[in-house]
């Protein structure tokens, strides 16, 4: 506070100057509020007054007394007056400049005293709209008549005070009107909602019947005999709702059955799965999805109850141990197709037993997501040379090496028509150049997804030199390094025969190469162009028009340029178009 002791003051704000000019001080505001709360005017002289109040002034109305109280406050107020008082500064010799400044300040105060009869008397915003207590008497700000304050009293629009009920109605403010209910805010829809394009057609009579059966599946006994052709469709419909259980599964049972496919047996207990074998003794083909409750006891019972079983496909037999698999293979030497997915306890001994007992009959082998799969598994598989047509060893816990895979392809490649090596992240272009290219001559289905070490030049070179007939299904998804060169050579080699093409994740392929799909692959049934950034409405439209006789499904997930504008041009299609992020219109 040394600056104040030396009578030196810094610059003041615009608000401080305004308050000073209007003679507004904390003292005047407090006095106004205190006077409003006490209707009777105080007698005597204020402790801070510079001029005494005479008897005449005490008799004046309340508003006049409030004004007088404000005038009595100190004239030289600024924002620093809020600080605590300090000891007066030591007297110093005043210069002529200081004397002149003081005289100017005094003259300014004299000029301001002319406006003391009408000072600013407004309350702060917080105080202005505080309604008096209910039952108190107030004067109307409009007609100046006294009225009783109630909960319906409203404040005056222009200036301080409150309005009586009559004046409030005249001004268009009905105090008795109930407030309107707050308007509920509608939730905004997702701007990036995914829209599927699908032509709406009337359902067939068969599909209507299947839906009715799936809704009333618990009334199995009332259905009677159902044709075998519709059994699989009914199974799919029931599996979507996950309503298949031990009570209604008997709909699919019969001693004459040779094939059963159940797409969701999550609710079937081990006892129900054992019963399946006893009630369908003539089964030769069995497929069970989501069969996590299959145990060793179930497999052991099938050893005797399903003697003719030759084709077995299971999804998720987690609980089956190696001894149960070995016993099953020994009791079924005629296995032709064995496909399992997610079986962590299937080991090398199980595979060796399967191949030794079914070496003359086994043609289809699938070990997908088998945790113990390694290079050691590929040696026994190579013993199936000359007879193996289908091989799926995808998504292992540990990738096999280039050398082991090439050796396997040299043994079985001549008869392989469908191969899946997805998820072996250590495989490189060497598998294409020295494994697939020279050893496969009858291949029709190729799946090599999620092989990050494949290169664009390597794959393009392999397709350009490959003597294998054109492929019908190619899946090279999730290989980010593949691009324009690979697609160009792929279409040159297999474009005319392609039925299914998956290019999901080819983010760098250019628009010109994508446009060639419509001209070189006119027999497509399904195509996945997800995350191919250059795909737009023109490319999709050209594919729809060139493949309209066969195309059933197009996936464009992650293709931000696709909006579906081909609909407005009159292009019609029966294909499902999945993954459009910005829809122009919906069929």
Image: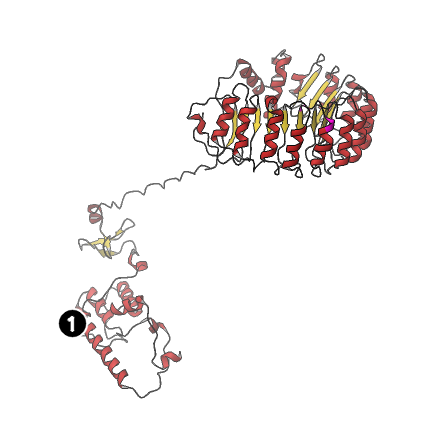
Residue interval drawn in magenta: 438-444
Query: Is 187 in the magenta?
Result: no
Question: Please, which residue is most extreme toward the bottom here?
Answer: 93
Q: Position of residue 158 (x, y in %)?
A: 23, 54
Q: Taking 183 as reference, is 516 above or below it?
A: above
Q: Taking 297 as reference, is 507 above or below it?
A: below
Q: Position of residue 502 (x, y in %)?
A: 60, 30
Question: Please, which residue is most extreme toward the front here?
Answer: 465
Q: Residues within 10 Å of mark 1 (few under 14, many from 20)?
A: few
Question: Please, which residue is most extreme toward the left here?
Answer: 56
Query: Which residue is at 27% across, 44% downward?
Result: 176
Q: Position of residue 386 (x, y in %)?
A: 78, 22
Q: Is residue 63 visible?
A: yes
Q: Taking 133 as reference, is 106 above or below it?
A: below
Query: Which residue is at 65% across, 29% downward?
Result: 464
Q: Quadrant of the N terminus?
A: bottom left
In the displayed structure image, the side of residue 26 where residue 523 appears, left or right: right
Q: Is residue 218 visible?
A: no
| Residue toward you, 356 or 247 | 356
Coloring basis for residues: secondary structure
Where does label 1 land, which residue? 56
């Amino acid at each position: 506070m040394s600056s104040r002791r030396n009578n030196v003051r810094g610059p003041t704000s615009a608000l401080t100057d305004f308050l000073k000019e209007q003679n507004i001080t904390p003292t005047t505001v407090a006095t106004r509020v205190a006077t409003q709360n006490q209707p009777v005017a105080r007698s005597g002289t204020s402790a801070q007054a510079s001029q005494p109040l005479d008897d005449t002034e005490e008799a004046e109305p309340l508003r006049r007394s409030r004004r007088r109280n404000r005038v009595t406050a100190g004239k030289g107020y600024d924002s620093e007056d809020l600080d605590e008082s300090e000891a007066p500064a030591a007297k110093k010799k005043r210069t002529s400049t200081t004397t002149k400044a003081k005289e100017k300040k005094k003259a300014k105060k004299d000029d301001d005293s002319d406006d003391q009869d009408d000072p600013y008397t407004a309350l702060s915003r917080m105080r202005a709209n505080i309604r008096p207590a209910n039952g108190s008497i107030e004067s109307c700000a409009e007609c100046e008549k006294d009225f009783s304050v109630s909960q319906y009293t409203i404040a005056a629009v222009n200036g301080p005070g409150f309005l009586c009920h009559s004046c409030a109605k005249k001004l268009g403010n009905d105090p008795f009107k109930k407030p309107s209910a707050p308007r509920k805010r509608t939730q905004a829809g997702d701007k990036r909602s995914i829209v599927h394009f699908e032509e709406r057609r009337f359902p067939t009579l068969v599909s209507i019947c299947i839906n009715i059966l799936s809704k009333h599946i618990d009334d199995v006994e009332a259905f009677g005999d159902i044709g075998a052709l519709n059994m699989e469709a009914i199974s799919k419909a029931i599996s979507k709702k996950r309503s298949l259980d031990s009570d209604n599964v008997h709909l699919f049972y019969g001693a004459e059955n040779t094939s059963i496919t159940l797409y969701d047996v999550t609710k079937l207990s081990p006892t129900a799965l054992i019963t399946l074998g006893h009630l369908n003794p003539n089964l030769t083909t069995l497929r069970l999805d989501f069969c996590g409750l299959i145990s060793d006891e179930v497999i052991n019972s099938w050893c005797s109850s399903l003697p003719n079983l030759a084709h077995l496909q299971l999804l998720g037999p987690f609980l089956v141990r190696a001894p149960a698999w070995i016993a099953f293979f020994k009791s079924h030497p005629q296995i032709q197709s064995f496909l399992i997915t997610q079986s962590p306890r299937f080991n090398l001994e199980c595979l060796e037993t399967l191949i030794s007992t079914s070496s003359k009959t086994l043609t289809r082998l699938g070990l997908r997501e088998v945790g113990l799969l390694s290079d050691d598994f590929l040696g026994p598989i190579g013993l199936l040379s000359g007879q193996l047509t289908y091989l799926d060893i995808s998504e292992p816990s540990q990738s096999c090496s280039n050398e082991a895979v090439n050796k396997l392809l040299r043994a079985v490649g001549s008869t392989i028509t469908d191969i899946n090596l997805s998820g072996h992240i250590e495989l490189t272009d060497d598998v294409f150049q020295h494994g697939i290219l020279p050893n496969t001559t009858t291949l029709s289905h190729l799946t090599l997804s999620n092989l990050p070490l494949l290169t664009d030049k390597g794959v393009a070179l392999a397709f350009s030199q490959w003597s294998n007939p054109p492929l019908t299904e190619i899946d090279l998804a999730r290989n980010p390094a593949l691009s324009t060169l690979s697609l160009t050579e792929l279409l040159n080699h297999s474009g005319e025969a392609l039925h299914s093409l998956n290019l999901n994740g080819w983010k760098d392929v250019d628009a010109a190469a994508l446009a060639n799909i419509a001209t070189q692959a006119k027999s497509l049934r399904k195509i996945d162009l997800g995350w191919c950034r250059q795909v737009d409405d023109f490319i999709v439209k050209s594919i729809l028009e060139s493949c309209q006789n066969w195309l059933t499904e197009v996936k464009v997930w992650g293709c931000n340029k696709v909006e579906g504008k081909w609909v407005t041009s009159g292009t019609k299609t029966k294909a499902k178009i999945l993954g459009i992020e910005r829809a122009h219109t919906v069929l």
